[in-house]
Amino acid sequence: MITITESANHRIKEMMANEEGDHLYLRLGVKGGGCSGLSYGMGFDNEQKEDDQFFETEGLKVVVDADSAPLLNGVTIDFKQNMMGGGFTIDNPNALMTCGCGQSFRTADNAGTPSKDC
């Protein structure tokens, strides 16, 4: 299960309002890369693929591809505002190691493919 806090949900819906399309999903995923080996992906999509996992929270429709789902199980996504602006934070209980920016991670079972430019 993935938790999206009220502040993150609100910010995502604000961003969606500026996108084209009536039936947008928030797509969450994981790909190889980043300093720690796996990088988070968040974006908007107009379609749900056959193997996607789907859930809805507070009116926000979310899809996660089957390969990413186990790596994101238990994740909490939040949006924090501060004097320097704001941004999304991801708390992943599966992460054995994370990079300083919090955008990449490694699990006990999946080291991913770290980027050479980190």
Image (tube, rainbow, N blue to C red):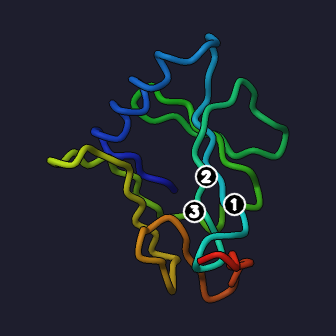
Q: Residues within 10 Å of mark 3 (few under 14, many from 20)?
A: many
Kindly identify which numbered label has been placed on residue 72.
3
Q: Quadrant of residue 114?
A: bottom right
Image side of residue 115 versus residue 87, left or right: right
Q: Which is more N-terminal, label 2 or label 1?
A: 2
Secondary structure of the residue carrying numbered label 1: loop
CA distance separating discs 2 and 3: 11 Å
Point out the image quarter for the C terminus.
bottom right
Depth check: give the residue in front, 37 or 69.
Answer: 37
Above or below: residue 101 compared with residue 18 = below
Q: Residues within 10 Å of mark 2 (few under 14, many from 20)?
A: few
Q: Quadrant of residue 49?
A: top right
Mark 1 and mark 2 residues within 8 Å of each other at the beta carbon: yes
Q: How many marks?
A: 3
Residue at point 37%, 35% (across, down): 9
Residue that numbered label 2 is attached to: 41
Residue that numbered label 1 is attached to: 68
Residue 78 percent coordinates (x, y): 34, 50
Q: Nearer the viewer, mark 1 or mark 2?
A: 2
Residue at point 46%, 16% (across, down): 17
Secondary structure of the residue carrying numbered label 2: strand
Q: Amino acid at mark 3?
A: Leu
Q: Which is more N-terminal, label 3 or label 2?
A: 2
Residue furthest to the right in view is 50
CA distance separating discs 1 and 2: 10 Å
Mark 2 and mark 3 residues within 8 Å of each other at the beta carbon: no
Residue 2 percent coordinates (x, y): 49, 54
Secondary structure of the residue carrying numbered label 3: helix
